[in-house]
Amino acid sequence: MKTLHKYLTLQVLASLLLTVAVFTFVLLLGTVLKEILLLLVNGQARIGTVLEAIGLLIPFVCVYALPMGLLTATLLVFGRFSADQELTAARASGVSLLSLVAPVLLLSLFCCGVSAWFNMDLGPRSRVEYKNLILRARADLMTVQLPVGQPIYDFPGYIFLVGENRGGDLKDVTVEWLKYNTTIYAPQGQYAVDTTNNVLALTLFNAVSSMVTTNGNAMLSSYGTLQITNALNISTNQTGKPKISDMTFRQLQDNARNLEQFNLPAAAGASSGELRAQFRAIEKMIGQTRAEMNRQIAFSFACFSFALVGIPLGIRMHRRETNIGIAIALALVLVYYSFVILGNSLAARPEFAPQLIFWLPNFIFQAVGAVLLWRANRGI
């Protein structure tokens, strides 16, 4: 019995490490191509910054990769175990399926603990650090040459296009001021950075602006010198409290406690309708906070739910092919995550009980897995 337990546990553990590595790489790939490599190509980040960003993303990605990897590992291992008639041999020796899979279920509970750490602490903190790192890379313009010949979208409300950049001396500068539907062109310009406030100060010489008015006409203006400094601080999101989705469990608890104790004063001249609207906004934030707390806890049990349903499905699958196991795993993951997406979309609607929605896939998967495991144990 000990030999079988050790054999199955090692098989599942080896497959788990491989599948988690594969899923982590796949999930990282999209973010790396979308954000990190773009910074590297634009000269806004060095190789060291890129590697640091990837390292910070790994714990956040493991929140999703670990349950997916464990589900795939159990499907593959027990599919091979059944296809090679090893399960039949174990039963012929008087070993029940339940006693055989007990170490694997214990391993899944250990993975639940690791997943809880990722979900409730390490993952959110790493995500916040990653966002801050990206913002710092974009804000550190003293060592950055603004890219030439391509639109620059790093500054909210503006789009820049630079024809030539020689150490801060610019030529053929085009600025799209989105708020006022205005296009500004200057043959020459300069930029400087306020490193204290991370604000870009752009000075344009002999600039000409064209603004489209409400009646469709173009209004032209010319400037000997034009400075653009306001609303270009790209580090404003770098400080302050993180979003609810990026908070650790302890931060969520503190946030919910502070919101519940918040005593909204009756502002002078405020109508009862305005106060009710403000109270509803606070209740909405409390609901979102508690929904996120439930999501983090419920999602930590996904490893056990996936293992409980993956073991009997692997046995029933009775196949050695890896592609079949991966296809079934992806289908089950899609079903599970659809509940999570639904709960997130209804987090601000307490009347729909989003907290319960986050727990539903665990209840369903564990119930179905327990029935399938019982039937497989009896050979049904």
Image: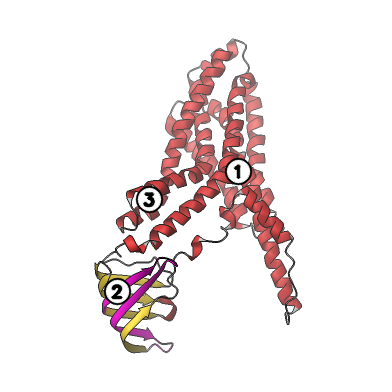
Q: Residues within 10 Å of mark 1 (few under 14, many from 20)?
A: many
Point out the tag, 1 or 3, that comes first from the N-terminus.
Answer: 3
Q: In the rendered view, would you say 268 is above or below 21? A: below
Point out the tag, 2 or 1, that comes first from the N-terminus.
Answer: 2
Residue 151 x %, y %: 32, 67
Residue 299: mark in rendering:
1
Give the residue at mark 2.
190
Residue drawn at point x = 73 percent, y = 74 percent: 275
Residue drawn at point x = 50 percent, y = 27 percent: 13
Real-space CA distance between mark 2 and mark 1, rounded to the nearest whole angstrom: 51 Å
Real-space CA distance between mark 3 and mark 2, rounded to the nearest whole angstrom: 27 Å
Closer to viewer: mark 2 or mark 1:
2
Residue 213 on the magenta segment? yes
Judged by its main secondary structure, the magenta piece is: strand
Q: Is residue 251 left or right of residue 322?
A: right
Residue drawn at point x = 69 percent, y = 56 percent: 256
Residue 213 x %, y %: 41, 87
Q: In the rendered view, would you say 263 is above or below 266? A: above
Q: Is residue 25 shown to the viewer in this render?
A: yes
Real-space CA distance between mark 1 and mark 3, rounded to the nearest whole angstrom: 31 Å
The amino acid type, in three-letter code, at marker 1 is: Phe
The amino acid type, in three-letter code, at marker 2 is: Gln
Q: Nearer the viewer, residue 147 or 293?
A: 147
Q: Are marks 2 and 1 in contact (CB under 8 Å)?
A: no
Q: Is residue 139 left or right of residue 357?
A: left
Q: Nearer the viewer, residue 352 or 59?
A: 59
Q: Secondary structure at mark 2?
A: strand
Give the residue at mark 3.
49
Residue 261 on the magenta segment? no
Range of residues picked out in magenta: 187-216
Taking the view exactly as shown, the residue that stands out farthest to the top is 93
Residue 104 x %, y %: 58, 26
